[in-house]
Image (cartoon, rainbow, N blue to C red):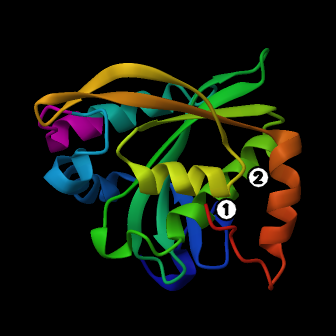
């Protein structure tokens, strides 16, 4: 895709969020099957290109309740996927899910910026009031980045997820609009530094 034909839905400083396209599916298939990436996700069975095509086709029928984006660097390189799931327009809630598939960009703050963009969209455009998230207890990087975005731990499901021969807690997190807005305003300023957690 040429620079002038690039699609950008939400523009950030280091990353953009854009719709998932059919051309992304081979890359997403590689990411979701990578053992190091998959270790932190709910998926435990192989995913084929056909599986991902069916997933994308299903998304187009669920636009009222699911919004999924490709995370791309400012230069257009796709590095991951992020979305809002189970959007409930009466309760004004949703759940986020995300992963960075390009492991060289783990721990670089790109996922945090992508989450900021997604949360601003959820609260300011979709008029949601509470966004939930889940993380495996050993996924400290995911928990830290959620806390930086204003999430708070709401509870744990003890010994809920089985990975590598043992059970682990699932951490339940959520952020309310009123807690996110001041953090978002600081993030938009040049001098913003994410608080250490």
| Image position of 20 with respect to 73: above or below | above
Q: Position of residue 135 (x, y in %)?
A: 44, 38
- Which element is circle 1 on? strand
Check if residue 47 falls in the magenta segment.
yes
Gap between marks 2 and 1 measured at Cα: 10 Å
Say above or below: 181 vs 103: above
Task: Name the residue that disc number 2 marks.
Answer: 120
Residue 176 location, x and y as percent? 79, 37
Q: Quadrant of residue 86?
A: top right
Q: Could you say where residue 34 lies in the image, as x and y percent from the top left?
A: 16, 54
Q: Residue at x 80, y 85 (%)?
A: 190
In the picture as drawn, the residue positioned furthest to the top comes out as 90
Please state the extent of the stretch shown in magenta in the rendering: 44-53
Q: Viewed as shown, does residue 106 lie left or right of 96?
A: left
Residue at point 88% right, 57% down?
Answer: 182
Alpha-carbon neighbours of circle 1 within 10 Å: few (<14), some, or many (≥20)?
some
Q: Say which residue label 1 marks.
A: 10
Residue 34 seen in the figure: no
In the picture, measured across the screen, residue 10 lies left or right of residue 129, that is: left
- Mark whose residue sits in front, 2 or 1: 2
**Quadrant the C terminus occupies:** bottom right
């Amino acid at each position: 895709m040429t620079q002038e034909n690039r699609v950008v839905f939400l523009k950030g400083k280091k990353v953009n969020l854009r719709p998932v396209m059919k051309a992304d599916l081979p890359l997403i298939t590689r990411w979701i099957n990578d053992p190091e990436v998959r270790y932190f996700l709910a998926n435990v069975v192989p995913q084929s290109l056909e599986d991902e095509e069916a997933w994308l086709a299903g998304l187009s029928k669920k636009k009222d309740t699911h919004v999924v984006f490709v995370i791309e660097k400012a230069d257009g390189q796709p590095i991951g996927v992020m979305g809002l799931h189970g959007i409930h327009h009466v309760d004004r809630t949703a759940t986020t899910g995300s992963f960075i598939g390009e492991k060289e960009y783990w721990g670089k703050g790109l996922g945090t910026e992508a989450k900021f963009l997604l949360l601003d969209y959820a609260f300011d455009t979709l008029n949601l009031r509470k966004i939930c998230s889940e993380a495996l207890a050993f996924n400290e990087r995911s928990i830290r980045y959620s806390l930086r975005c204003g999430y708070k731990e709401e509870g744990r499901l003890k010994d809920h997820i089985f990975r590598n021969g043992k059970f682990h807690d699932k951490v339940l997190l959520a952020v309310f609009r009123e807690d996110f807005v001041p953090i978002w305003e600081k993030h938009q300023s040049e001098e913003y530094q994410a608080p250490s957690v």
